[in-house]
Image (cartoon, grey):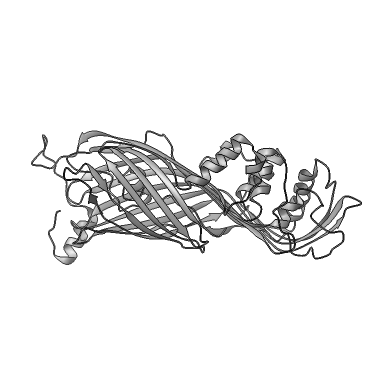
C-alpha cells in the first residue's frame, strides 16, 4: 500500500502552471453557467424552466508533468521498474507538475423572470488542487545508490522539494440577470468545507551515501503543514463537515458590443479555507539513517524515514489558506457559414491568470456547430511555453446537453497508450511534458417552456430582476429587455 501511495505522491503532488477547462466557454451549458456566472443557461420560448444534472457527475480532471523525471515515473507506474538514464544529478534540475479535479455532484438552476432573464441556481462540488516541484536527485534516490557518489560529495540541497495539496467541498448559490439588452452580471457565492491540506517545503537538505554498507544518512530542514486528518483517509472523510470552514465568491459580466462581439470578464473562486485548531505545523530539522537501499524494500524504507523526519517538532493550531482563484477575460463572436444558418462558428479568445500563483494561460476556442452537434478545437499556450491541443464533442439542444473531451488530446492518448501497451521504448522516453485531461458533462431541462406573454398559454407576472430594479432606480431607466 505504501508503494502505491508513494507512486501517487510522485506522480501527482510534484508547479508553476495550472490547468483549466476552456472548451465550455460560451456554450450555454449548465456547467458553463456555474463556472462563468454571467453566462445564461436558458433561452426564452424554447428552453424549459428548470435545469438539472440528475446527480450525474460533471467533471474536469487533468494532470501535467515536465522535466527529466517523466521516463522514471512512467517506468515505475507502468513497468514497475526505474530508469534513471535521463536524470541529471547535481545539476540543479527539477520536475514540475500539476494535478487538478473539479467534480460537480449536483447542479440545479431555475429561470425565475422574463424581465431581466433572471436565473437562480445551486451546486455542490468537490475540488482537488495539487502543485509542486521535485528534484531529479529525489527520483533517482528511489532506485538505489548507483546515481550518487560515496561520502557527502556535492550532495547538498539536492532534496529541496516543495508541494501543496488541498481538497475541499464547495456548496454554491448563483444569481444571474440581464441589466439591459447588452450587459449581464452574475454571482456565485460559495461555502467551503475543507477535507485535507498538506504543504511541504524542504529548504535545506544533505545526504551521505555509503554504498558498501548500503545506507544513506539524510538530513532535512523545512516546514510541513497538515490539516487535521482523523485516522486513515476513507470515503467518509470526504463527506461534508464544518471543522474546516471557508468561503469564496465568483463575479462575472458579459457585454455585447454594437458590432456583435461578446466580452466576458470573470473573477473566479476568490476565497479561503480556515483549517481547524487541531491542524499541525511541523518545523523539522532532523536526520535519519536509511538502510537497505539496494533491496526491494527501499521505497518503504525511504518513505518511513522521511515521514519520521518531517513529522517532527509539531505545533498544533489553525491556519488559513487561499484556494486557486483566477481572473479571466474573453472575447467571442458568432459567424454563420451558410445562408440557412445551419453551420455556426463562434471562436473565443481567452486570457486566464491565477490570482495567488504565477500561472498564465492564453486559449483560442474554436467551436463548429451543425444543428445540435458541436465539435470544438481548443489551443492553449502558457507561461512555461507549453502548447496544448484539445478536442470536445458535444450534443446540445435547448433542453438537453452532453459533452466529452480533453484539453490535452495528444498527451492523454500517449499516456493511455503507454499504460496499455507497456512498451519500454515508449515508456522510457521523455517528451516536452507528460499530461492527461478528461472532462464529461450531462444535464436536462424540464418543466414548463419559458414563454413570452404574447406566445404564452398562461400569462406570467414576473418582475424585473433585483439588480435590474436597483440600477433602474439609480439611473432612471425603464429598460425591460
Q: Position of residue 30 (x, y in %)?
A: 33, 43
Between 142 and 223, the one nearer to me in the picture: 142
Image location (x, y in percent) of residue 106: 40, 39
Give the vertical position of 342 relative to 132 (above or below): above
Q: Is residue 396 visible?
A: yes
Q: Nearer the viewer, residue 442 or 466?
A: 442
Q: Position of residue 425 (x, y in %)?
A: 65, 42
Task: Specify whether 369 is left or right of 78.
Answer: left
Q: Quadrant of the N terminus?
A: top right
Image vertical order of residue 475 relative to residue 343, above or below: below
Residue furthest to the left: 454
Front-lying residue, 65 or 450: 65
Question: Can residue 316 be seen in the rendering of this structure?
Answer: no
Q: Is residue 163 left or right of residue 399?
A: right
Quarter where residue 54 is shown: top left
Q: For this view, does 403 lie left or right of residue 371? A: right
- Viewer-proximal residue, 295 or 371? 371
At a point 23% along the width and 51% down the height, the residue shown is 335
- All told, the count of numbered labels is 0
User: In the rendered view, does 61 fall on the left or right side of 3?
Assistant: left
x and y, in percent, of residue 92 in the image: 69, 64
Q: Farthest residue in the right direction?
A: 212
Residue at x 40% of width, y 50% of height:
378
Amino acid at each position: 500500500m505504501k508503494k502505491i501511495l508513494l507512486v501517487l505522491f510522485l506522480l501527482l503532488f510534484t508547479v508553476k502552471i495550472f490547468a483549466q477547462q476552456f472548451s465550455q466557454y460560451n456554450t450555454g451549458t449548465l456547467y458553463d453557467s456555474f463556472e462563468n456566472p454571467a453566462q445564461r443557461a436558458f433561452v426564452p420560448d424554447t428552453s424549459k424552466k428548470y435545469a438539472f444534472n440528475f446527480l450525474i457527475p460533471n467533471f474536469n480532471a487533468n494532470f501535467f508533468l515536465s522535466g527529466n523525471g517523466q521516463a522514471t515515473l512512467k517506468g515505475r507506474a507502468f513497468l514497475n521498474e526505474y530508469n534513471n538514464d535521463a536524470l541529471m544529478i547535481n545539476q540543479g534540475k527539477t520536475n514540475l507538475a500539476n494535478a487538478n479535479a473539479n467534480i460537480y455532484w449536483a447542479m440545479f438552476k431555475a429561470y425565475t423572470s422574463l424581465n431581466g432573464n433572471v436565473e437562480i441556481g445551486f451546486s455542490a462540488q468537490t475540488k482537488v488542487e495539487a502543485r509542486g516541484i521535485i528534484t531529479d536527485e529525489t527520483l533517482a534516490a528511489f532506485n538505489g545508490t548507483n546515481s550518487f557518489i560515496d561520502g557527502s560529495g556535492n550532495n547538498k540541497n539536492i532534496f529541496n522539494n516543495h508541494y501543496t495539496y488541498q481538497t475541499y467541498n464547495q456548496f454554491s448559490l448563483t444569481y444571474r440577470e440581464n441589466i439591459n439588452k447588452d450587459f449581464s452580471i452574475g454571482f456565485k457565492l460559495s461555502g467551503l468545507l475543507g477535507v485535507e491540506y498538506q504543504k511541504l517545503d524542504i529548504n535545506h537538505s544533505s545526504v551521505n551515501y555509503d554504498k558498501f554498507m548500503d545506507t544513506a544518512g539524510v538530513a532535512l530542514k523545512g516546514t510541513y503543514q497538515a490539516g487535521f486528518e482523523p485516522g486513515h483517509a476513507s470515503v467518509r472523510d470526504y463527506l461534508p463537515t464544518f471543522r474546516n470552514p471557508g468561503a469564496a465568491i465568483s463575479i462575472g459580466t458579459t457585454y455585447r458590443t454594437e458590432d456583435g462581439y461578446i466580452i466576458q470578464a470573470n473573477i473566479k473562486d476568490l476565497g479561503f479555507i480556515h483549517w481547524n485548531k487541531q491542524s499541525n505545523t511541523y518545523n523539522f530539522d532532523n536526520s535519519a539513517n536509511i538502510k537497505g537501499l539496494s533491496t526491494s524494500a527501499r521505497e518503504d524504507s525511504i518513505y518511513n524515514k522521511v515521514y519520521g523526519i518531517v513529522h517532527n517538532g509539531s505545533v498544533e493550531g489553525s491556519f488559513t489558506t487561499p484556494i486557486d482563484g483566477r481572473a479571466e477575460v474573453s472575447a467571442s463572436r458568432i459567424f454563420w457559414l451558410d445562408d440557412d444558418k445551419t453551420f455556426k462558428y463562434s471562436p473565443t479568445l481567452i486570457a486566464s491568470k491565477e490570482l495567488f500563483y504565477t500561472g498564465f494561460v492564453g486559449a483560442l476556442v474554436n467551436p463548429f456547430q451543425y444543428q445540435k452537434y458541436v465539435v470544438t478545437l481548443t489551443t492553449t499556450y502558457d507561461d512555461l511555453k507549453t502548447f496544448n491541443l484539445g478536442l470536445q464533442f458535444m450534443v446540445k439542444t435547448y433542453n438537453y446537453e452532453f459533452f466529452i473531451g480533453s484539453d490535452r488530446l495528444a498527451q492523454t492518448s500517449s499516456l493511455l497508450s503507454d499504460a496499455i501497451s507497456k512498451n519500454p521504448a515508449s515508456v522510457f522516453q521523455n517528451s516536452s511534458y507528460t499530461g492527461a485531461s478528461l472532462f464529461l458533462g450531462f444535464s436536462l431541462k424540464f418543466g414548463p417552456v419559458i414563454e413570452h406573454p404574447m406566445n404564452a398559454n398562461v400569462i406570467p407576472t414576473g418582475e424585473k430582476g433585483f439588480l435590474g430594479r436597483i440600477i433602474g432606480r439609480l439611473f432612471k431607466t425603464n429598460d425591460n429587455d
